[in-house]
Image: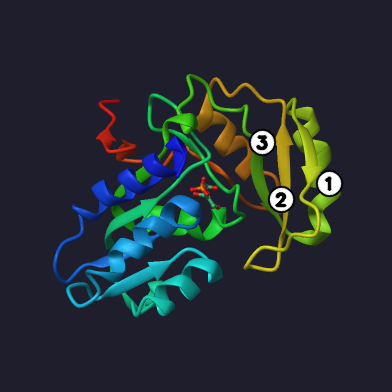
Amino acid sequence: MNTAEMQKRQAAAAALTHVEDGMVVGVGTGSTIRYFIDGLAGLRSRIEGAVSSSEQSSALLRAAGIPVLDLNAVGPIPLYVDGADECDLSRCLIKGGGGALTREKIIAEAAQTFICIIDASKRVDMLGRFPLPVEVIPMARSMVARQLVELGGQPVWRDEFTTDNSNWILDLYGLSIREPEALENRINQIPGVVSVGLFARRRADQVIVGGTTATR
Ligand code: 5RP
């Protein structure tokens, strides 16, 4: 196992220590979260269940014997654990490399505590080297793309990919994101945008890098 994979596994193990008896746990999507789901399987008799951010994670959770709950049927979620594609020193994130950004954002918003688990390669001083995913309603794709060009990015339609919500993704290249919250708000205002993979307004409460909780 390479260093990044070891750090993902360590971060997932550290996040598992935050799971308490009777909890409904919000579960993200991606390769780091697979380790978390593996560990959560060992706690399944102690938790009420999980709210999942993607069909992929739902399948893994069910295979692990963990009940997948409807967000509408549960109250606020005490704990949400998810990975990220980039994380800055203010705990703002780029997410959506796996295309699950919209449901991830919904769960983050519903969560009392959002713990982000990453390997060290995801830590950056400034967000933007990783292309910023934007989920769009299909009919709005080229109009949204033109507006994203005006914001200074180069949008690329994610090839042969449809989200769990039957939408499309534009990956926005070439940005140096100096003001993540302002850009998140700006992109959210474009009609046809379902959500943008900037998690700044509702950023992570805690970031675990490998086995270590980041101080900032
Ligand atoms: C999926 C995500 C993931 O959290 C992100 O892509 C990181 O994935 P991985 O843990 O595989 O590096 O946002 O939409």
Depth order, front residue of 104/9? 9
Image quarter where the C terminus lies is top left
Residue 34 bears which disc, if any?
Answer: none
Which label sits on residue 143? 1
| Three-letter code, disc 3 | Pro
For the residues bearing labels 2 and 1, Cβ distance under 8 angstroms: yes
Q: How is the image coloured?
A: rainbow
Q: Can residue 55 be seen here?
A: yes
Q: Quadrant of the N terminus?
A: top left
Residue 214 or residue 200, whichever sits in front: 214
Q: Amino acid at mark 2?
A: Pro
- Is residue 87 visible in the rendered image? The answer is no
Label of residue 131 in the image: 3
Tag 3 secondary structure:
loop
Compared with residue 62, is residue 170 higher up or lower down, i.e. above or below?
Answer: above
Q: Residues within 10 Å of mark 3 (few under 14, many from 20)?
A: many
Dot 2 falls on a residue whose secondary structure is loop
Earlier-in-chain disc, 3 versus 2? 3
Location of residue 129 in the rendering, given as x and y in whole percent from the top left corner: 62, 27
- Chain-order first, disc 2 or disc 1: 1
Give the amino acid type for the residue marked by disc 1 in the picture.
Met
Residue denoted by label 2: 191
Q: Which class describes the residues within 10 Å of circle 1: few (<14), some (14-19), or many (20+)?
A: few
Question: Distance of mark 2 from mark 1, alpha carbons?
Answer: 9 Å
Q: Residue at x 29, y 65 (%)?
A: 40
Taking the image as shown, residue 101 lies to the left or right of residue 52, namely: right
- Residue 73's place in the image compared with 201, above or below, is below
